C-alpha cells in the first residue's frame, strides 16, 4: 500500500503524536492538511476531510478505497470524553466518504480502567464474589460500551499499547473480529536497558535484577527478562497487600527467583504498566532499598502525571524513572515538575508506526534498528541522552 492509499488524521488540531506518526508512516501531507476540525458556536464538532476543489466526479467518495488512520492521544485541553466523541465522528466521516478501512491508534486506550460492572450480558459475573460485584453495583461496563460505539462509528481495527486489562483485551478482540492489537514495548525497554547508562547491567546481566511490584506486573517483567536475553538477570516478585485507600505493605512472593537478601549491590528496575499515585512503587522501592541495592529505577508505560504521583515518586528511595509517551503530556517539563531531574521518556512514534505499516502492508525495514527516540531534560544528570543506532 502506497502513501496515496492511506490518510493519517487526528481528532484535534496540532496533535504532536499524530504529526509524528504521519511523518514516520511516510505521509507527505501534514495532518492539518488532511482534515478540517471545525467546532460550531454551539460547541458541536464537525470534521471535514479535505478534497480537491475541482474534483466534481468524486463528491462523497473522496476516500474510496483508502485506509484512514486516526491518531488519538490524551491532551491537556480536552477531556477523554470529548476526545472519544471526536474520534467517533471522524470515523463516521471517513466511512461516509467511502473509506475502505478505519484504524484507530490510541496508545492509552480510553475507558480501560472501567472494565467492570456487576453484570455481563445481563447476568452476574460468575468468576467474582458478591462482595466484589457489589463494589461496582449501579455502574456501567464502560469499556464494553466504548468498544461497541467505536465499531458502530466505523472503526475496523484498534491499535493500543500495553493494555492492562485481560477483560478489555478479550472484548475488543471479540468486537473487532480479532483486529485489536495490544503492543507491548518490551523491545524498547530491553534495548534502552542494555545500551544506555541508566543501570550497570554487568557481565551477562549479573548486576541487574528486574522487579514486579505485584502479581499483575509479573508477565510484563518476564517478557522484558526474556527479551534482554542475558542469563544473569534475575527476577524478584513482590506481594502487595492494600491496607488502606493510599497505603500498601510489601512482602516477597513465592514466585521470586531471588530474595531481598540476595540483591545487595545490584541495580534493580521495577517494571509496571501504569502509575497514577506512585504509592505502590515507592513502598516497593523502599523494601528493595532495605536489601542494600545499587540503584533502584522504575520503568512504566503509562505515566499519569498527577500531583500525588509527582510528589510520591520524588522519593529518595527511587533513583531514576523511564517511561513512554503514550500519555503525551509527560513530555511537558511543567508536568514533569521536579521529576525531570530523574526522568527519561522513550518516544514510541516510530515503534508504533512500524507496527501500523505492517497492517498497511508498507513496512520496508526502515525502523528495524532506530525504532524509538529519547527525550530528557537538561536537568537530568545523565544529559545528554544516548540515542538508538541510526538516529
Image (cartoon, rainbow, N blue to C red):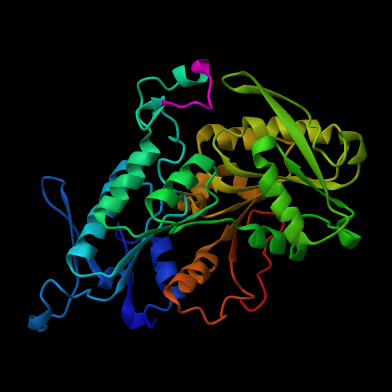
In this picture, residue 278 sits left or right of residue 112: right
- What is the quadrant of residue 212 in the picture? top right
- The residue most toward the left is 56
Magenta region includes residue 349: no
Quadrant housing the C terminus: bottom right
Query: In the picture provided, is 371 more to the left or to the right than 78?
Result: right
x and y, in percent, of residue 19 in the image: 39, 67
* Residue at the (47%, 43%) spot, across then down: 168
Whether residue 127 appears in magenta in the rendering, the answer is yes
- Would you say residue 117 is visible in this rendering? yes
Per the picture, the main secondary structure of the magenta-coloured stretch is loop
Q: Quadrant of the N terminus?
A: bottom left
> How far from the left and from the top, in percent, is residue 178?
45, 57
Residue ID at (47%, 73%): 357
In this orientation, which residue lies closer to the viewer: 346 or 49? Answer: 49
Residue 22 left/right relative to 315: left
Q: Residue placed at 57% from the left, 37% from the top?
A: 310
Residue 304 visible from this viewpoint? no
Residue 331 x/y as whole percent: 51, 54
> Camera-side residue: 58 or 178?
178
Tell me which residue sits at (47%, 21%) in the image: 133
Q: Is residue 101 above or below residue 312?
A: below
Q: Give the magenta part as a residue range.
A: 124-131
Q: How many numbered circles does the render carry?
A: 0
For the residue pair 113 and 152, the one nearer the viewer reads as 152
Percent from the top left, x then y, of residue 353?
48, 69
Amino acid at each position: 500500500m502506497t502513501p496515496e492509499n492511506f490518510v493519517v488524521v487526528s481528532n484535534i488540531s496540532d496533535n504532536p503524536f499524530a504529526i509524528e506518526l504521519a511523518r514516520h508512516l511516510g505521509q507527505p501531507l501534514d495532518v492539518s492538511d488532511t482534515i478540517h476540525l471545525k467546532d460550531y458556536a454551539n460547541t458541536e464538532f464537525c470534521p471535514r476531510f479535505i478534497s480537491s476543489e475541482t474534483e466534481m466526479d468524486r463528491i462523497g467518495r473522496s476516500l474510496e478505497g483508502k485506509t484512514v488512520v486516526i491518531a488519538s492521544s490524551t491532551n491537556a485541553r480536552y477531556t477523554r470524553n470529548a476526545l472519544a466523541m471526536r474520534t467517533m465522528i471522524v470515523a463516521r466521516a471517513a466511512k461516509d466518504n467511502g473509506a475502505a478501512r478505519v484504524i484507530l491508534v490510541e496508545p492509552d486506550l480510553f475507558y480501560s480502567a472501567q472494565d467492570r460492572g456487576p453484570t455481563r450480558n445481563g447476568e452476574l459475573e460468575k468468576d467474582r464474589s458478591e462482595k466484589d460485584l457489589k463494589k461496582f453495583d449501579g455502574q456501567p461496563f464502560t469499556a464494553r460500551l466504548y468498544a461497541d460505539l467505536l465499531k458502530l462509528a466505523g472503526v475496523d481495527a484498534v491499535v493500543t499499547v500495553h493494555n492492562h486489562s485481560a477483560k478489555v483485551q478479550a472484548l475488543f478482540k471479540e468486537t473487532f473480529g480479532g483486529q485489536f492489537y495490544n503492543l507491548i514495548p518490551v523491545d524498547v525497554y530491553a534495548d534502552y536497558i542494555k545500551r544506555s547508562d541508566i543501570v550497570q547491567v554487568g557481565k551477562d546481566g549479573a548486576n541487574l535484577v528486574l522487579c514486579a511490584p505485584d502479581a499483575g506486573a509479573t508477565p510484563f517483567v518476564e517478557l522484558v527478562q526474556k527479551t534482554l536475553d542475558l542469563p544473569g538477570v534475575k527476577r524478584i516478585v513482590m506481594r502487595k497487600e492494600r491496607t488502606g485507600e493510599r497505603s500498601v505493605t510489601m512482602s516477597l512472593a513465592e514466585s521470586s527467583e531471588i530474595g531481598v537478601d540476595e540483591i545487595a549491590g545490584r541495580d534493580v528496575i521495577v517494571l509496571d504498566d501504569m502509575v497514577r499515585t506512585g504509592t505502590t512503587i515507592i513502598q516497593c522501592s523502599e523494601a528493595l532499598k532495605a536489601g542494600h541495592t545499587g540503584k533502584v529505577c522504575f520503568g512504566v508505560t503509562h505515566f499519569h502525571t498527577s500531583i500525588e504521583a509527582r510528589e510520591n515518586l520524588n522519593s529518595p528511595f527511587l533513583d531514576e524513572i523511564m517511561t513512554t509517551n503514550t500519555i503525551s503530556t509527560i513530555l511537558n517539563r511543567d508536568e514533569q515538575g521536579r521529576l525531570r531531574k530523574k526522568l527519561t521518556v522513550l518516544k514510541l512514534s516510530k515503534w508504533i508506526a512500524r507496527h501500523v505499516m505492517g497492517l498497511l502492508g508498507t513496512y520496508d525495514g526502515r525502523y528495524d534498528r532506530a525504532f524509538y527516540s529519547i527525550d530528557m531534560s537538561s536537568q537530568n544528570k545523565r544529559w545528554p541522552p544516548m540515542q538508538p543506532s541510526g538516529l
